[in-house]
Amino acid sequence: MDEISPKLQNQIAQFQQLQQQLQAVLTQKFQMEAQLREMERTVEELNKSTDEVPIYKSVGSLLIRAKDKESVLKEIEDDKETLEIRVKTLDRQEKGLRERYQSLQDQISKALGSAKPEGAG
C-alpha cells in the first residue's frame, strides 16, 4: 500500500476537513447552549426579585440601570429565542456533517481494506 490513489487522497482530505467543520459546529453549539443556560438562570433570578430592586444591564463596557424588570425580561427572552433558533440550525448542520463524516469514513475504510495485499490480515 505504498501508493494511495488520488481519489483516496482526496477523500482523506475531505474527511479531515469534515472533522474540522464538525468540531467548529460542536464548539459553537456548546458555547450557545452555555449562553442559553445563563439566560435561563438570569430570568429565574429576575422573576424572584421584586420591582423595587434596581436592575442593571450591560451595554458595551457599561452597566446601565434598566427602566423596569419587564423590559429586561423581554429583551432576554427575545435574545434567548434567537439563540435557540441558532442552536437548532447548528443541530441540523451537525447532523448533516455527521452523516457525511460516517459515509466518507466507510468509503475510506473500504478503499483501504481493498488495498490490502493478498493473504494479509
Image (cartoon, grey):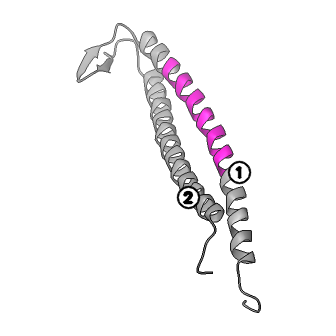
Q: Quadrant of the C terminus?
A: bottom right
Q: Mark 1 or mark 2, which is nearer the start of the sequence? A: 2
Please tell me whether mark 2 or mark 1 is closer to you in this view.
Answer: 2
Residue 16 in picture, x, y percent from top left: 54, 58
Magenta stretch: helix, strand or loop mostly: helix
Q: Secondary structure at mark 2?
A: helix
Q: Mark 2 — residue?
A: 13
Residue 98: in magenta span: yes
Whether residue 96 is in magenta: the answer is yes
Q: Can you tell which quarter of the image residue 93 is in?
A: top right
| Real-space CA distance between mark 2 and mark 1, rounded to the nearest whole angstrom | 17 Å
Above or below residue 21? Residue 118 is: below
Residue 94 position by quadrant = top right
In this picture, residue 95 sits left or right of residue 79: right
| Viewer-side residue, 56 vs 78 | 78
Would residue 15 be found to the left or right of residue 79 on screen? right
Q: Amino acid at mark 2?
A: Ala
Which quarter of the image is occupied by the N terminus? bottom right
Q: Residues within 10 Å of mark 2 (few under 14, many from 20)?
A: few
In x, y percent, where is residue 81? Answer: 56, 23
Quarter of image, res 113: bottom right
Q: Is residue 52 above or below residue 100?
A: above
- Residue 115, numbered label: none
Where's residue 56, x and y in %? 30, 18
The magenta-colored residue range is 78-99
Q: Image height check: is 96 above or below 119? A: above
Residue 85 or residue 10, whichever sits in front: 10
**How many numbered marks have been drawn onto this rendered protein structure?**
2
**Residue 30, position as x, y percentages in the image:** 50, 44
Above or below residue 119? Residue 29 is above
Question: Furthest residue to the top?
Answer: 67
Residue that label 1 marks: 99
